[in-house]
Amino acid sequence: MPPRCQRCGDVLGVYEPLILITEGLPCATSRAAEPHLFPTTDPGYHKACYELDGRPGGLAFGPEKRR
């Protein structure tokens, strides 16, 4: 089953930007960029949906920013 956005419920596409909340921190990525992260139990959002909730940028990017 493909991952879904926690805000709108739509599928998180393979190539679209998404925000994955890992250990409480938002990280900008995509399923194509980091396929090893999926499947996951961490909540994910479309980038636009995450920003609609008033949570702007300042995000970590890519695996080098993860623990």
Image: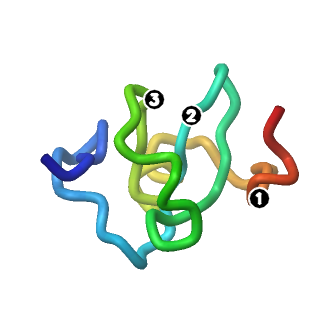
Sequence-earlier tag: 3 or 2: 2
Q: Are marks 2 and 1 in contact (CB under 8 Å)?
A: no
Looking at the image, is 42 positioned above or below residue 37? Answer: above
Distance, label 3 to label 2, CA atoms, is 6 Å
The residue lying at 79 percent from left, 50 percent from top is 60
The residue lying at 45 percent from left, 51 percent from top is 52
Element assignment for label 3: loop
Task: Give the x, y percent position of residue 17.
Answer: 50, 69
Q: Is residue 48 left or right of residue 7?
A: right
Q: Are marks 3 and 2 in contact (CB under 8 Å)?
A: yes
Pointer 3: what residue?
A: 42
Which residue is most to the top?
23
Sequence-earlier tag: 2 or 1: 2
Mark 3 Cα-neighbour bin, 10 Å: few <14, some 14–19, many ≥20: few
Pointer 1: what residue?
A: 61
Element assignment for label 1: strand
Sequence-earlier tag: 3 or 1: 3
Element assignment for label 2: strand
How many circles with numbers are drawn on the protein?
3
Q: Is residue 37 left or right of residue 8?
A: right
Looking at the image, is 23 positioned above or below residue 8? Answer: above
Image quarter where the C terminus lies is: top right
Mark 1 Cα-neighbour bin, 10 Å: few <14, some 14–19, many ≥20: few
The amino acid sitting under disc 3 is Asp
The residue lying at 38 percent from left, 26 percent from top is 41
The residue lying at 61 percent from left, 30 percent from top is 22
Q: Based on the displayed image, in which of its 4 quarters is residue 34 positioned?
A: bottom right
Pointer 2: what residue?
A: 21
Looking at the image, is 54 positioned above or below residue 63? Answer: above
Mark 2 Cα-neighbour bin, 10 Å: few <14, some 14–19, many ≥20: some
